[in-house]
Every structure is written in C-alpha cells, then in structure tokens.
Amino acid sequence: MIDQEPQGTSAVEAQGHVTDSPTFPPDDLSDTALVHAPTAVADIPSRLFGSFIEHMGRGVYGGIYEKDHPTADTWGFRHDVIDMVKELGVTCIRYPGGNFVSTYDWKDGIGPRDQRPVRRDLAWHSTESNEVGIDDFHRWSRMTGTEIMLATNLGTKGIQECLDELEYVNGAPGTAWADLRVRNGIPESMDISMWCLGNEMDGPWQVGHMDAQEYAATVAKVSHAMKLAESGLQLVACGSSSAHMPSFGHWERTVLEKAYEHLDFISCHAYYYDRGAASFQDFLLSSADMTHFITTVAEISSSVKARRHTNHEVALSFDEWGIWYSDEWNRQEKRWIEEAAAGLHHDPWPQAPHLLEDRYTAADAVVEGSLMITLLKHCKQVRSASRAQLVNVIAPIMAETKGPAWRQSVFYPFAAAANFARGVAYAPIIEGPRLHTQHFGEVQAIDSVITWDEKRKQGLVLIVNRDEQRPHTVTVDCSSMPSMAGSRMIIDSAQMLHEDDPMKCNSPEEPNAVVPRHVTPWSNTDGSITLDMPEISWAAIRFHGSQA
Ligand code: AHR
C-alpha cells in the first residue's frame, strides 16, 4: 500500500478510491480512532509557517551564503538553498538571532563588505565576518519571498539603537539613517513590521540577561518609543525561554502587566529531543508539553487583558520550536567554560564552525509533524511561529560546502502544512486509544487537525500516530466542513512518513532515505476518510469538495 515517494512535496499525488464498504470499523476497536466533530479554531495566519536564521555555525556563512559555491549569485547567496527554502514554503524568517543578537551591532553589517569590521561573537565563541548584514538579508528575503522578523539587541544595547535601526530599515529618505540605507543601495523601505525586543532575556546564558521587572521596564520603554516612531509595528516581547524556566508564568505576567498596550506578541521557545524526555514514548508526545506551554501563556495574556479592560490582544509568537539534541551542545559549552576558567585566551575563534548540525530521524519528523498539528490547533492564540532553525543549524535544509543541498526528514511535515494548510483550522474530537506517559499522564495516541479553505473548497487533514508500539486505523470525518453539504469529497493526494526503523536519517550520501510515500486511504461514502497509521507515523491528506 505504500510506494516510495521520490523527493519534495510537489511529487506527492496519489488518487484515493471511493468505496461503499469501508474497512472501518474493523472488528478490533481497540486499535481504531475516530476523528470527528471538527470545531473552527481560527483563520490560519501565514506567519505560522515561519522559520529562523541566526548568525551561528553554518546557518548564514556556508548556509544561505557561500560566495564560491557554483550556484552563488553576485551577492554570494546560494540558489540551490533559495530553491529549497521556497519549496519548504517558509513565510517569515526571524533574524539575526537568537543568542547572537545580544552582543550584535547591526551597524557592523552595513556598507561596503570589505570595510565591515570582524568581531567576536560571545554567544557561540565564533568570529563574525559581518559579510552578511541587514541589507544583504533584505535582498535574500526578496529572493525567497519571505518576510523578515527582525530581532534587536537588548543585551548590550537599548532604545537608541532600536530607533536608529528602525529608521535605517523602514524610514523614508530625508533623514540620516534612511539616507545611509539609500546610499548603501536600498532605495526602498524594507517595511519590516515584526520586531523581537531582545532574545531569551530570562536566560542566565544570555549576555545582558535581566530579571522579570528589569526586562518589563526595558520593554515598556523600548516599545513605547518604537511605536511613537511607527504605530503600525508589531512588537514581540520575550517570554520564557522554555516552560521549564523557574520564572515561567511570573515572567510573562510581569512583562505583560507592565507593557501590555505597546506589545502585540509574547514569545514562547521550546526544543525537544528523545534523550531529553522521560522516555521515548514521552518524546513522541512532546506536543503535550507544547500544548501546556501555549495554554498557560494564553491564559496569562487573557487575564492581563481582562484586568486592564482593554480590547487590545497580545498573541503568542512561538518563535523557536523544533528538535534540538541539546545535550551535545551542553557538552561543547561546558568545554569552553572549562577552557576559559584556565586563564587568559588569545586564540582566534573559528569562523562558521560546524555547530548544532543535528541529523534528524524519521521519529523526529513525526514529532515535528505533531508539533505543527498543535500549532494549527492553537492558531487562535499562536499567530506567529518560527521553526528553529532553517539551514545547517538544527535545520530542515542542509548545505554541503561546495556541494549540494539536501532535505532532512523534518523538512516534509513542515512543507506539507506550509504549502497546503489554508483557510481555517479545525480542531476535531478524537476518540481512540490512549497512551500512558511519565510526564503527561494519559494522552491520545492519535492527534489530528483539519484545515479548510471554504472559498476553494480545498482541505488538508494532518494525522499523527504517536504510539511507539502499535498501529491504529484512523477514520477522519470531514463531511461537516462549511459548504460541503451536497458535495462529494475527493482525495487529491495522500502521503505518509513512517520508517520501520524510526532512527533512520537522511544524509548527504542517502538524501532520500526518509521521505514521505504515497498512500491510498479509503474515501467513504459518508464523507470520511479511513487510513491505517503504523506506529510512529505522520500523514497528510489533501481533499476537495466536488458537486455531487
Ligand atoms: O536556536 C539556538 C538557540 O536556542 C538560540 O540562539 C537561542 O535563542 C535558543 O536558546
């Protein structure tokens, strides 16, 4: 039933067949799940399919930029990578960090490249050449058709630098900073509306980290000033660096109480990996942690809103999410700290070292598919999200130096949602087998979301089986989608990601070892779809309504 899928999502076209005698319900109901009664959540914001590029490792240098690469243009940008970024369907990209931003001077990255200063980057113990800066990234974003979400330095800088940068990137010619941009070759305003006010300022690892009161006071002043300059900006305050920070909750409340009216988003960051979870089964259910994170922060934001008697909404920006094998990074950081403790250091730091180049498994792809389902199911609260990161560094796209780019397993669930989840997200009721976990109690094995573009009568069903052990047969009822009455449901394509060895990865040698494959679900006469989901699997089914 499963055929090999070559690569990319464009090739995913499988005709479903219609039957009057569906296999559902089978005799053994313990292995079946019913996904039904979908309730509208909200319109799907395009920024939900954002990503993140930080100046670290080979994300920028050796990632999007490699001036000697055969596909590089005159700016030094790799076009094989650009093509893959477009294929992924990324909409909005957070830049330039991350921890990097907390010592970054954006002025180092403008003007003639050969006159830009080389600096030390304290966050990643690297040497920053500044060959790429905001002007260059603006050009790259135009080529990829993506929006920039610009992060400012509130670690070593403050209000004035934010205002200067705002004037430089967005200002109309006629003031000093805007004129400098024009002289640097960018006559048009960059029209950057999303701004992150610092990065993870609650984290002791962050240069210039603050306590909640200090950050709240800083953000209140910076956001007030930036909105005086441009009232239409959308400002993102740092939330907790994870839901496991000791100040989680208190931090969000303190920041929102102080600066609510000037803010538009509060950020959430969460990374998962199997060795960081209580068990492999718990890892597969990482979305339970993400759900708890979202609902807690959303409740805090609503309660602050209610207390202030305002109509203004502060939404969530889940602007770092994904899988990161952070134990490897922690070991490396520990070595640096030990070396630094041994005396003075004058050795040069490496340029664009291999950092966080995690190789993702099939199981990782299923977990990321499940996290995307969670984001869609909560898109009323989460109006922006950035999968971290995009190229080479904990990334769906890998770029070999002087060689080809290739897709990691996690590329595919993101691409399916980013390219085809349109219209409104619908959260269904799920009745089926439950799993016992150490951290999250009892959780459904199956999770799913339905998206529906009423105007085009086109839908997408995303399903994940998070059960480590058992396959389940899943029936999804899509018949109640608006304007579906009197229509026949036609399956346009169906793809599944599952490997018998869940630890299988793609690599430069085998770039298509883990890819989605065509599957053939049952399209039942009652407007539902039935699909067998193996253990640890993810599926995407595209359908449309046709006049009966
Ligand atoms: O994405 C890698 C790092 O993770 C980012 O620099 C930081 O914000 C987070 O801790």
Image: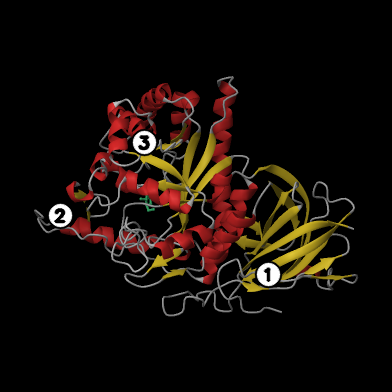
Q: CA distance from mark 2 to mark 1?
A: 57 Å
How far across and down, in percent of the image, does residue 427 sit? 70, 49
Location of mark 2 (residue): 341
Location of mark 1 (residue): 13
Location of mark 3 (residue): 169
Decide which of tag 2 and tag 1 comes sooner along the chain: 1
Does residue 387 appear in this view? Answer: no
Residue 339's tag is none
User: Amino acid type of disc 3?
Assistant: Val
State which quarter of the image contains the C terminus. bottom right
In the picture, measured across the screen, residue 288 lies left or right of residue 428, that is left
Q: CA distance from mark 2 to mark 3?
A: 40 Å
Could you tell me which residue is drawn at 81 percent across and 66 percent down?
A: 523
Q: Between 301 and 57, which is closer to the camera in this rendering?
A: 57
How far across and down, in percent of the image, does residue 373 sit? 62, 54
Q: CA distance from mark 3 to mark 1?
A: 42 Å
In the picture, measured across the screen, residue 24 lies left or right of residue 242, that is right
Disc 2 secondary structure class:
helix
Disc 1 secondary structure class:
loop
